[in-house]
Image (cartoon, helix red, strand yellow):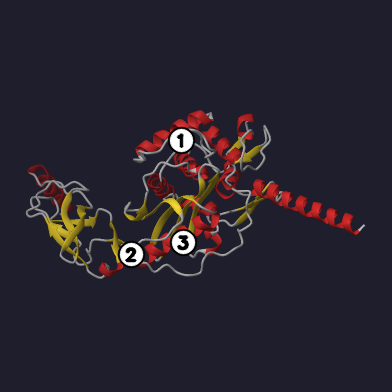
């Protein structure tokens, strides 16, 4: 009887473990959630610029997304299988379709048989089941659901094949020269390859869309009125201050991959880890990269200092002056040791003669770090000034006589 009880209890334990794994496959991007509640390494990486970081992965990179500056890299151009971080490009195309107004978050999508046939992580869509774009985005971003991702691709391009062609075209536009997509999900396929550098490029483009962070920062959510729970396997969302996303990925070929984004003190960073040895290695590797960036660099959006210069003189115009403004800001990434050495010098064109069109360049703000010029900001006219002529003078005289 005792022996039978032990066997029965062992069977229950095995069944329980299997159920956990099956359940996890329906609500997260990976079946293995055994370490999802284990915090990251608590030590802060204080490596100085130029030091080597010990990260257990084939390829890593740290990029500042607004300038495209690479702060750290190791083997960043090796072509590797990307697993589900492929979906970063899929999601970028969805965000752009939303921006164009081609679709809305309320657009209802009917699942095709092809979408429902996807293997790997999924939310178990049934053929002809309907969900909104908002719901499919939750499933794709948080749970890395392949069926949801394909359904979104079919909505935009009519078929997964058409969507993949659009993904490859967009990759070329972004300068992702070492990337070829075979599918939109990241399932292992011959020739489906990218690099850490290319992943950082598309990640930088995706996080320009603030809407994505409404999904990528979510730790837990649900679908189908709470019947389907979603768990984000990006541990950084829970355990790393300032995390804004972005996407995990794991397959037998790709190993453990992660594109992680975080923001602190006005600076956002993208850390990519590909072909990590273990799940924790990718998270701790990304943490080391992000710590390195936040410890050593500062990001600035510099404005031209026009506080004491609101307008400039114009000759032979109907007005003697024209207002001025800066044409944008200069985005600048600097080592923290140089962040207090920023200065600027204003120069303006001499003898500006009408006509002047709104937007005409009338000056320049040169930005310096120490004695080195690092960029400039154009100063433009904020209004038009017509050239003075006899006809205008005549109209002024007539108007003045009528008043009298």
For marks 1 and 2, give the one nearer the viewer.
1
19 vs 385, left or right, is: right
* Mark 1 surroundings: few (<14), some (14-19) or many (≥20) residues within 10 A: many
The N terminus lies in quadrant: bottom right
388 vs 331, left or right, is: left
369 vs 79, left or right, is: left
Residue denoted by label 1: 181
Q: Is residue 272 in view from this perspective?
A: yes
Q: Residue at x 37, y 67 (%)?
A: 47
If you read the primary sequence from the N terminus, does the residue marked by circle 2 or circle 3 appear first? 3
Real-space Cα separation, disc 2 to disc 3, in angstroms: 17 Å
Q: Position of residue 358 (x, y in %)?
A: 22, 48
* Mark 3 surroundings: few (<14), some (14-19) or many (≥20) residues within 10 A: many
Q: Secondary structure at mark 3?
A: helix
Residue denoted by label 2: 298
Q: Are marks 1 and 2 in contact (CB under 8 Å)?
A: no
Residue denoted by label 3: 287
Real-space Cα separation, disc 1 to disc 3, in angstroms: 28 Å
Q: Residue at x 10, y 45 (%)?
A: 394
If you read the primary sequence from the N terminus, does the residue marked by circle 1 or circle 2 appear first? 1
Q: Position of residue 148 (x, y in %)?
A: 59, 40
Q: Residue at x 55, y 58 (%)?
A: 235
Q: Secondary structure at mark 2?
A: strand
């Amino acid at each position: 009887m005792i022996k039978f009880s032990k066997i029965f209890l062992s069977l229950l334990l095995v069944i329980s473990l299997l159920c956990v794994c099956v359940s996890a496959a329906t609500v997260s991007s990976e079946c293995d959630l055994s370490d999802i509640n284990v915090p990251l390494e608590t030590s802060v990486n204080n490596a100085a610029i130029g030091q080597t970081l010990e990260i257990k992965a084939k390829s890593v990179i740290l990029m500042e997304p607004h300038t495209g500056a690479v702060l750290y890299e190791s083997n960043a151009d090796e072509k590797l299988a990307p697993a589900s971080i492929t979906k970063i490009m899929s999601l970028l195309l969805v965000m752009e379709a939303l921006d164009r107004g081609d679709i809305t978050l309320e657009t209802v999508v009917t699942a095709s048989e092809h979408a429902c046939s996807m293997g790997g992580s999924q939310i178990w869509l049934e053929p002809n089941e309907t969900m909104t774009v908002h719901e499919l985005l939750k499933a794709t971003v948080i749970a890395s659901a392949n069926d949801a991702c394909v359904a979104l691709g079919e909505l935009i391009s009519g078929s997964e094949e058409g969507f993949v062609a659009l993904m490859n075209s967009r990759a070329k536009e972004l300068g992702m020269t070492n990337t070829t997509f075979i599918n939109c999900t990241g399932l292992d396929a011959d020739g489906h390859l990218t690099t850490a550098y290319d992943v950082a490029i598309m990640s930088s483009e995706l996080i320009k869309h603030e809407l994505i962070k409404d999904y990528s920062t979510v730790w837990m959510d649900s679908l189908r009125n709470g019947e389907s729970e979603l768990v984000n396997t990006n541990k950084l969302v829970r355990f790393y201050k300032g995390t804004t996303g972005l996407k995990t990925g794991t397959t037998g070929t790709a190993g453990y991959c992660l594109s992680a984004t975080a923001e602190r003190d006005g600076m956002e960073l993208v850390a990519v880890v590909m072909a990590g040895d273990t799940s924790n290695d990718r998270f701790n590797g990304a943490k080391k990269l992000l710590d390195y960036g936040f410890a050593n660099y500062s990001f600035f959006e510099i404005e031209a200092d026009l506080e004491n210069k609101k307008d400039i003189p114009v000759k032979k115009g109907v007005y003697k002056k024209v207002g001025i403004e800066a044409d944008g800001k200069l985005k600048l990434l600097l080592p923290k040791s140089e962040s207090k050495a920023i200065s600027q010098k204003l120069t303006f064109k001499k003898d500006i003669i009408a006509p002047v069109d709104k937007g005409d360049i009338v000056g320049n703000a040169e930005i310096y770090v120490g004695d080195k010029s690092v960029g400039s900001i154009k100063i433009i006219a904020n209004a038009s000034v017509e050239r003075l002529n006899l006809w205008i003078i005549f109209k002024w005289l007539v108007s003045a006589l009528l008043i009298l």
